[in-house]
Image (spheres, rainbow, N blue to C red):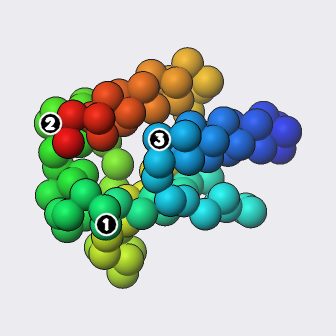
Amino acid sequence: MVEIFRRRRDYVYQRLVDMGLDVEKPEGAFYMFVDIRKFGMDSNTFCTRMLKEGLVGVIPGIHFGTEGFMRLSYCYSDADLKEGLDRIEKFIKSL
């Protein structure tokens, strides 16, 4: 099970980096904080737009005391992660 989550973490991390996003690879958590400050909007606005326009739900970092970031979980199936990351990439390219 640990290896499955390690592989998922590495996959999500690399996809986000390939999209040009700044993210620190977690060592023990099942989520990542992704820096979204370069998009010029607060985390609530960014995450609401991603939900409405990109059909992906993420949590605004402000709810964890880190404005300018979004929190993204990788506790999903490989297929769901790929679909979600494809949607995130499409949304980001539309900005």
Indicate the quadrant containing the C terminus: top left, top right, bottom left or bottom right.
top left
Q: Mark 1 highlights which residue? A: 37
Horizontal and vertical percent for residue 13?
61, 46
Residue 23: mark in rendering: none
- Residue drawn at x 66%, y 36% is 11
Query: Local crowd at mark 3 within 10 Å, few (<14), some, or many (≥20)?
Result: some
Horizontal and vertical percent for residue 73?
51, 48
The amino acid type, in three-letter code, at marker 2 is: Lys
Horizontal and vertical percent for residue 92?
30, 40
Q: Earlier in the sequence, mark 1 or mark 2?
A: 1
In the rendered structure, are the residues bearing label 2 and label 3 in contact, judged by CB atoms less than 8 Å apart? Answer: no
Q: Is 94 or 54 nearer to us in this picture?
A: 94
Q: Quadrant of residue 18?
A: top right
Mark 3, secondary structure of its residue = loop
Q: Mark 3 highlights which residue? A: 19
* Disc 1 from disc 2: Cα separation: 19 Å
* Disc 3 from disc 1: Cα separation: 14 Å
Query: Local crowd at mark 2 within 10 Å, few (<14), some, or many (≥20)?
Result: few
Indicate the quadrant containing the N terminus: top left, top right, bottom left or bottom right.
top right
The amino acid type, in three-letter code, at marker 3 is: Met
- Residue drawn at x 71%, y 43% is 10
Q: From this viewpoint, is residue 5 visible? A: no
Question: In the displayed structure, would residue 9 be above or below residue 76?
Answer: below
Q: Mark 2 highlights which residue? A: 52
Mark 1, secondary structure of its residue = helix
User: Left or right: 14 with respect to 2?
Assistant: left
Q: Earlier in the sequence, mark 2 or mark 3?
A: 3
* Disc 2 from disc 3: Cα separation: 20 Å
